[in-house]
């Protein structure tokens, strides 16, 4: 699967053959003059530490059966989403149009600007703070980031952060195991390859 071929059309990733689209009800329109210039990297797994199940989709779609696992009782009534999820095998699901705000950041602040949902894109990696991410996830994230940077040039390298950076008291994701240096390296390499 060549993720480098991803493009964005009217806020959604294409081609649809490469990306699963599951529209979430948990979004709000952006203000029309709001520039998108922040990318926030998260992690999520449901139940914690278990991968490949459908519960993340269910949560973002508002369909999670909170009786399915003991730990899900904390999620009753929770309305959250992200623009995209990258699973362990690198496959991408999009839940919210990039033109809309996904509900991923919560109370947050970046360089003195609050309410990061207003001007950011949120990408979830299926994972935890202490289990290393897969090579496919780094490649998928780099390809997706490059595609987003082409569409939203305000997402410069310094404006790609973790949830832990914009909500440091509440959040730790994507965790210490996320290799920022390696990710930036992959992003630079893809960017150079695209230009030559
Ligand atoms: Zn997060």
Image (tube, rainbow, N blue to C red):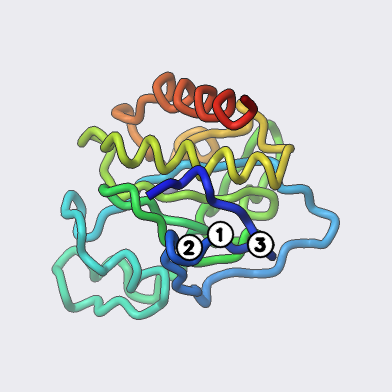
Dot 1 crowding, Cα within 10 Å, few <14, some 14–19, many 20+: many
Pointer 2: what residue?
Answer: 94
Asked whether the beta carbons under mark 1 and mark 2 sit within 8 Å of each other, the answer is yes
Asked whether the beta carbons under mark 3 and mark 1 sit within 8 Å of each other, the answer is no
Find residue 192 and report its horizontal and vertical position in percent.
Answer: 58, 23
Residue nearest the observer in this picture, 69 or 34: 34
Q: Is residue 17 above or below residue 176?
A: below
Quadrant that contains the C terminus: top right
Q: Residue at x 57, y 34 (%)?
A: 160
Who comes first in sequence, dot 2 or dot 3?
3
Q: What is the distance, in whole Å, between disc 1 and disc 2 at their CAs?
A: 7 Å
Find residue 102 and report its horizontal and vertical position in percent.
Answer: 56, 61
Pointer 1: what residue?
Answer: 13
Q: Locate residue 94 relative to residue 50 in the image: left or right.
A: right
Marks counted in the figure total 3
Q: Is residue 114 above or below residue 156?
A: below
Q: Secondary structure at mark 2?
A: strand
Tell me if residue 124 can be seen.
Answer: yes
Task: Judge depth for marks 1 and 2 and give the one in front.
Answer: 1
Who comes first in sequence, dot 1 or dot 2?
1
Q: What is the distance, in whole Å, between disc 3 and disc 1 at their CAs?
A: 6 Å
Asked whether the beta carbons under mark 2 and mark 3 sit within 8 Å of each other, the answer is no
- Decide if ligand 1 comes within 8 Å of the CB at mark 1: no
Q: Residue at x 33, y 48 (%)?
A: 90
Tell me if residue 172 can be seen.
Answer: no
Q: Residue at x 69, y 50 (%)?
A: 119
């Amino acid at each position: 699967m060549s993720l480098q071929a991803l493009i964005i059309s009217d806020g959604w990733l294409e081609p649809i053959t490469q990306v699963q689209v599951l529209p979430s009800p948990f979004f709000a329109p952006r203000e029309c003059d709001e520039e998108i210039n922040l990318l926030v990297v998260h992690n999520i797994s449901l139940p914690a530490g278990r991968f490949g199940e459908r519960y993340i989709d269910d949560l973002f779609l508002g369909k999670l059966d909170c009786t399915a696992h003991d730990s899900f009782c904390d999620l009753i009534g929770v309305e959250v989403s992200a623009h995209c999820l990258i699973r362990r095998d690198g496959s991408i699901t999009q839940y919210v149009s990039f033109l809309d705000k996904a509900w991923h950041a919560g109370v947050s602040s970046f360089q003195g600007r609050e309410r990061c949902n207003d001007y950011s894109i949120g990408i979830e990696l299926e994972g935890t703070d202490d289990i290393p991410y897969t090579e496919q996830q780094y490649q998928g994230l780099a390809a997706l980031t490059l595609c987003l940077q082409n569409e939203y040039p305000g997402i410069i390298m310094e404006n790609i952060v973790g949830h832990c950076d914009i909500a440091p008291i509440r959040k730790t994701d994507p965790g210490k195991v996320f290799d920022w240096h390696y990710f930036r390296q992959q992003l630079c390499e893809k960017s150079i390859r695209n230009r030559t």
